[in-house]
Image (cartoon, helix red, strand yellow):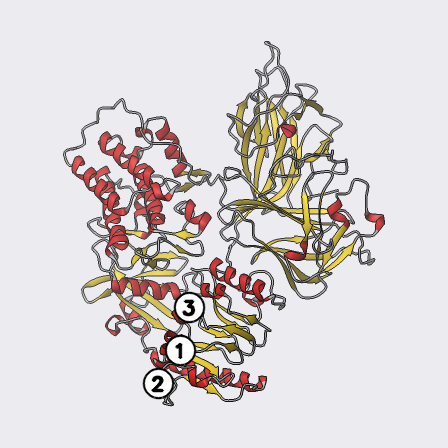
Amino acid sequence: MTMFRSFYFMLLVNATLPLATIHAQDDQSGFISIDCGIAQGTNYTDNKTGLNYVSDAGFLESGVSQKILPTYNFPNLDIVYTTLTSFPQGTRNCYTLRPKQGKGNRYLIRARFHYGNYDSKGQPPQFDLYLGSDLWSTIRFNAMLPVNYEIIHLTSSDYIYVCLVNIGLGTPFISALELRLLDSSMYANQLQSLITFNRVNYGTSERVRYGDDKYDRIWQTTTSNTLIAVHTSGTVSNLGSSTANEVPSKVMSTALTSPNLTSNILIPWTATNAADEFFIYLYIAEIETLKRNQKREFNIYLNGKYWDGPISPLNHTTTTYFIRSSNSLNINISLRQTKNSTLPPIFNAIELYNPKQLLRQQTEDLDAEAIWRTRSMYGLKRNWQGDPCVPQSSAWVGINCSYNDLENPRITSLNLSFSGLSGELADALANLTMIQSLDLSFNNLTGNVPKFLASFSFLEMLNLTGNNFARPLPSELVEKSKDRSLLLIIEGINNQDKGSCTKDSCRKNKNNKVVILVTATIAATFVLLTTLAILLIIKRRRAQDVPDDIIGSRDQRFTFGEIQSITGSFKTIIGKGGFGTVFHGSIGDNQVAVKLLSESSAQGYREFQAEVRLLMSVHHKNITSLVGYCDEGSRKGIIYEYMANGNLGMHLFGGSPNVMSWKQRVQIGYDAAQGLEYMHHGCKPAIVHRDVKCSNILLNEKFQAKLADFGLSRAFNTEGDTHVSTVIAGTPGYLDPEYYTTTRLTEKSDVYSFGVVLLELITGRPALSGDIYIVTWVKSAVAEGNVEKIIDPRLQGDFDINTAWKVVELAITCVDSISSKRPTMNDVVTDLKSCLKEDEGFHGAKPNKLDRHTDLSLESMQGPNLR
């Protein structure tokens, strides 16, 4: 029996019944099906499902193949449960999956476990299951029964790592690992990962899986002594319904209903923890043939509170009802017929998920691909598995990485000394663009030393000792060693020293860092001591090269004592946030704002440095000016010009009694747009703000808007790079969905966020309000052609309808889900300037209503719906 969690329906869940033999006809190109524990190189097709399974030997390096005891090979047990791979060695053992469809796709990942007393201990273990660096779940067993754990995950990397971690409660193991590519429209209104709590098909004893469900979701079965099972032989369609989850017709063709009109239908369950949140998908379709005088109508209640209705199910057509529940241990959905109904409620299927926000931090794909290809080319056996850099405590032996909150970890050091490498140097290493130290010593590498080694901008040490490379070395590499930018270590081999260097490149002088080791067979201990000495030299040289003030001008640097004096011993607080606290202060006759970072601030030192450096180099009337900064150990602060009217959000949503006029709003949008335009098009390299939102738009005493908070900003060369890849950063509600799914940051990501700000200016509503996402709400209203409906009612109609339409159209174009369809900030500034000019002649007269329908294309209006 397979169980996702403890799901206590009033109905008895029956998962032990046989799964009908299915001859699958659907494409499995988006599937990875691994039967753990079968012999290396073997594969088979499951007779029940038609699914093609392979051995797990090609997906990890560790583990021991095992078989369950015959006693636990239950009738109709899925074949994948009869073998398993256990991990008695090591704390963390990982499978590496690389689906050919790559990142930016949504996958269902299922890990399957059946203990089967394989070790004859009679005691199932308990261990942790990780997805990359994020805890997926703790694996627990119900007696000796099989369990499944599922997650629906939107990937931001080409690599998916599934890891089993020993927590001291027995040896981890796994029976099967399955990955299924979902359609991009499925479960697409959620940006979080979804952990399956249960998935149930009502009114049948036949479990549904692949062949009937082309995505291979496993639909459990139910029986009931009090409800009536009904079914249809006709097809139940998803077409024209509100669901994009593509529930199979076979699932929807059965249902449960009440035998009479006097009883409500109750669907209860118990959460694992009272704090758990649930995303509930309730699927309903009418599958009985109703007579003319019959009517089925009912309401949906969640824990006794009205949720939706009245509902009259569509004939042989699926409708999805999405419900969100949290903070309750015992939860129930009840279906209650209305007074007008002559038939009791009906329901067909349900899916329950616990949403989970994963950090999704993984090694940069280019680096991961480089190291995996290198590992494969040389057949390296180093117990390298999982992510090369993450988690930091489990980084691969011989690899060092850089870590910060803003970027994916990058490989900065690779030591392959004494690794038995032979043949030419792997071209894949050319992708390690952030490498600082590369040790290839004492292998059997041959051929030419590749020129790409000289192209590494950050490479400080290269050790090629003990190989058979051809000579001469690339002149570019030798030149870098001569100009003190590279420490190159290589010895004479096969008496070819004379021809190993370009003219004059091997002369003995104190600036030449080519070290010629006379003896070809140097003891390993000596090599290690030499390497340590080299690294110490590098460290000292770097320390000499770095000025005391790592940020910039001393004219703008203040001591902590001066900060204390400026703020009057931190007397007046004018703002708080995750970074710390903002205080009011004065320098002479000028007022200032001082942002003092708390030691536990989420805005770390890198972000502090980034913001200070940016504000020192960027000057624009619509960007907050830097007055100075403080950097004394753990005491860090930034001094800005004082903005008397706070941030934009305080006036739109903060209950301010003074309502901003329409013209003020358009002007503020225009001001902020000019600041972004300058960052995107006036700076070299271009700068992406990365966190545009109302609270980061400040207003001075004249209500002139200026952009603020540049800790997350990124610069990149628009001439050579169309994007940069980063760890996702930003604020929910303002976050570009394309950036979220691909991690590809461009200036169009700012355009999306700015479009959300425009919508907030227009409507007076926040980006997220409960379950309502402003982008979805506005697009729905625009589709109806009624722009007046979305304008902030506090304006009482005091706006020009023509200008309003133009600003709304501009905002919606900015939040197009496809970044290439969004305007540039140059275009935005031009359009807002035009709107301001048109609005100059409007003096508060009530506008004439126009008979105007939107001419916008609604095909791509699919922004993230956070319900």
**Quarter location, residue 579:** bottom left
The structure residue drawn at horizontal position 57% and vertical position 25%, both measured from the top left corner, is 237
Q: Which residue matches tag 2?
A: 504
Measured as percent of width and height from the top left, residue 767 is found at 38, 42
The structure residue drawn at horizontal position 73% and vertical position 55%, both measured from the top left corner, is 39
Q: Is residue 519 left or right of residue 760?
A: right
Amino acid of disc 1? Leu
**Quarter location, residue 610:** bottom left
The structure residue drawn at horizontal position 24% and vertical position 37%, both measured from the top left corner, is 662
Amino acid of disc 2? Asp
Res. 617 visible in picture:
yes
Q: Which residue matches tag 1?
A: 486
Res. 11 visible in picture:
no
- Residue 391's place in the image compared with 310, above or below, is below
Measured as percent of width and height from the top left, residue 790 is found at 33, 32
The disc label shown at residue 630, or none? none
Q: CA distance from mark 3 to mark 1?
A: 14 Å
- The secondary element bearing badge 3 is classed as helix
Answer few, some or many: residues within 10 Å of disc 1's Cα (few below 14, many 20 plus, some between 14 and 19): many
- The secondary element bearing badge 1 is classed as loop
Answer few, some or many: residues within 10 Å of disc 2's Cα (few below 14, many 20 plus, some between 14 and 19): few
Earlier-in-chain disc, 3 versus 2 = 3
The structure residue drawn at horizontal position 64% and vertical position 56%, both measured from the top left corner, is 58
Q: Is residue 276 left or right of residue 812?
A: right
Amino acid of disc 3? Phe
Measured as percent of width and height from the top left, residue 249 is found at 62, 28
Q: Which residue matches tag 3?
A: 452
Q: Is residue 411 left or right of residue 783?
A: right
Q: CA distance from mark 3 to mark 2?
A: 23 Å
Answer few, some or many: residues within 10 Å of disc 3's Cα (few below 14, many 20 plus, some between 14 and 19): some
Earlier-in-chain disc, 3 versus 1 = 3
Mark nearest the camera among 3 and 1 is 3
